[in-house]
Amino acid sequence: MDNVIHYASLFLFAAGSFFVITGALGLLRFPDFYTRMHASGVTDTLGADLILWGMILQADGDWLLIAKLLIIMLFLMFTSPVSTHSIAHAAWVGGLNPLLGKELKHHDIAPDRDETKAPVEMPGGEEQNKGGAA
Amino acid sequence: MNDPVSFATEFHPSSSPIFFVELAILTLLVITSIAMLRMRRLFGVVMLSGIYSFLSAAFFVALDAVDVAFTEAAVGAGISTVLMLSAMLLTARREKPYAPGHAALAAVVCVIVGGALIYATLDAPPYGDAAAPANSYVGQAYVERSAVEISMPNIVTTVLASYRGFDTMGEVAVIFTAGLAVMLLLGIGSDRGGKDVRDVPRMVGREEDGPGLGEKPTLDDGGKSPSPKGGAS
Amino acid sequence: MIMFVVATIAVIVAIVIALARAILGPSLYDRVLAGNAVGTKTILLLGLMGFLTGRPEFLDIALLYALMNFIATIAILKFFAYRTMSPQMRDMSPRLGNGNHDGGADG
C-alpha cells in the first residue's frame, strides 16, 4: 500500500511538473494575449491541482495538513478560472482584439502587429523590449 | 523526514535543498528589482513590485520568518499594489527620463552604505546558530516557558497573543484597516456595484467619443464583433 | 524527497518564465496574467518548501497567498475597468472623469 501511494504521488508530481512547465512555456511563447491566457489558465489549474494531490498523498495521513491542502486546492479550483476569465473579460472590454486566422499564420513576419496597433497600447510601447528609454 | 528534531540537528544550510530554493528566490528578486529599475512604464513597475512582494514573502518563509511573511503577503502584495495603482492614476503613466546629474554621487553613497552593511554582516552570528543572541536570552525563555505557561503548540502564537498582547492589539487595528481597504476595493458602496459592465470594446470608438461610463449597458455585442476593427457599432 | 526536488525545480522554472512575461509585457493584461501566474506558483512553492524542510505546517501562508492573489488580481482589473478605486476618488481629480480621454487601460 505504501508503494502504491509512493508511486501514485511520484506520478502526480511528474505530471504536475510537466503541466506547470508547459503552461509557463505557453505563457512565454504564444503569439497573442488570448492564447497566452489559454495556456496559462488551463495548465496552471491542472498542474497546481496535480501537485497538490501529490502533496496530499505525501502528507502521511496528517488530517490537518490534508485539510489545509484540500482547502488550498478547492480555492485554486474556484479562483484560478475566475481570475483568468476576468482578465480575459477585462482585455476584451478594454479593446484588445485577438489574432485570428491569417494573422496568426503571419505572426512570424510581424510578431507584435496586434500589440503595437491595439488601442490599449500606449504610443511607443515597443521600446519596452529594448530596456526602456535610458 | 517529518521529524523536526532530527532536522534541527542535521541541518547544514549549504547542503539542504532549501538552500538552493533560497538561492533561486534571491536571484529572482535581484532580476525583478533590476527590471523595476529599468522599466519606464509605471503599471509594469507596479505589477513587478507585486511579484517582488510575493517572492520576498516566499523567501521569508524559507528563512522561518513566518509572521513577517504573513505581513509581507498581506501588505506588500495586497494593499501596497493597490495604493501604488491609485497613486499612478493621479500621476503620469510613464516615468520621465531622469536627469543624469547626481548619478555619480548617488553611486558613491550606495557603494558606501552597501559596503557598510556587508561589513556589518561579517559580525553577525551564522544562520541558525543556537548560541546567537536572538536564540539565547529572551527567546530561550519564551521557548521554555510558553509550553508550560500557556500550553499552546505554536510559540509564535503565544508570544503574539499573550506575552505581547497589547502590541498585537495595535497590529489588529492595522489589519482591520487593511480589511476595510479590501472591502472598499471590492465594491461595497460603489456607485456601480458591478452592474454597468459593457462588453463592447471600449477603446475602439474613442475618437468619436463613444458611450460614457454612465450610459446603459449593451451586453449583447460582445462576441459578435471580434474582427480587428469591429465593435464600433 | 526527489519528487519534491523535481517539482520545486519545475515551479521555479515556471516562475522564471512568468517573470520574463511580466517584464516583456507588452500589454497591461499580459502583465496582470503573469503576476497571477507567479502568485499561483508561489503558493505551490510554499507548499513544496514546507515538504522539503520536513515541516509542512506553514501551509497557512500558502492559503493566505491564494486569497491575496485572487483579491489583488480582481482589484487591479476592477481598477482598470472603472479607473478608480471608489466613487469619491473620481471627484477629486479632473483627470479621473467619465470621459475616455485618459486612456484608461494603458500599460
Image (tube, coloured by chain):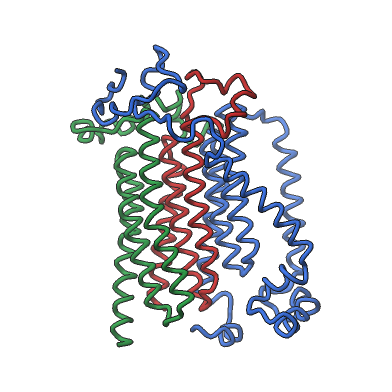
Q: Is residue B96 visible?
A: no
Question: Who is closer to the viewer here, A8 or B199?
Answer: B199
Q: Quadrant of residue C9?
A: bottom left
- Chain B tint as drawn: blue
Is C74 displayed left or right of B200 in the figure?
Answer: right
Where is C78 relative to C16, above or below?
Answer: above
Where is B164 relative to B15, above or below?
Answer: above
Which residue is painted at 57% across and 34% down in the image?
C85
Callout count:
0
Which residue is painted at 68% across and 76% down in the image?
B155
- Quadrant of the frame with the C terminus of chain A: top right
Question: Who is closer to the viewer here, A117 or A96?
Answer: A96
Which residue is painted at 42% across and 35% down in the image?
C27
Percent position of residue A87, x then y: 40, 41
Q: Quadrant of residue B57?
A: bottom right
Percent position of residue C22, x then y: 45, 44
- Chain A tint as drawn: green
Is A28 displayed left or right of B23 in the figure?
Answer: left
Percent position of residue C3, x then y: 38, 74
- Quadrant of the frame with the N terminus of chain A: bottom left
Percent position of residue A58, x then y: 40, 78
Which residue is painted at 46% across and 32% down in the image?
C81
- The chain coloured red in the image: C
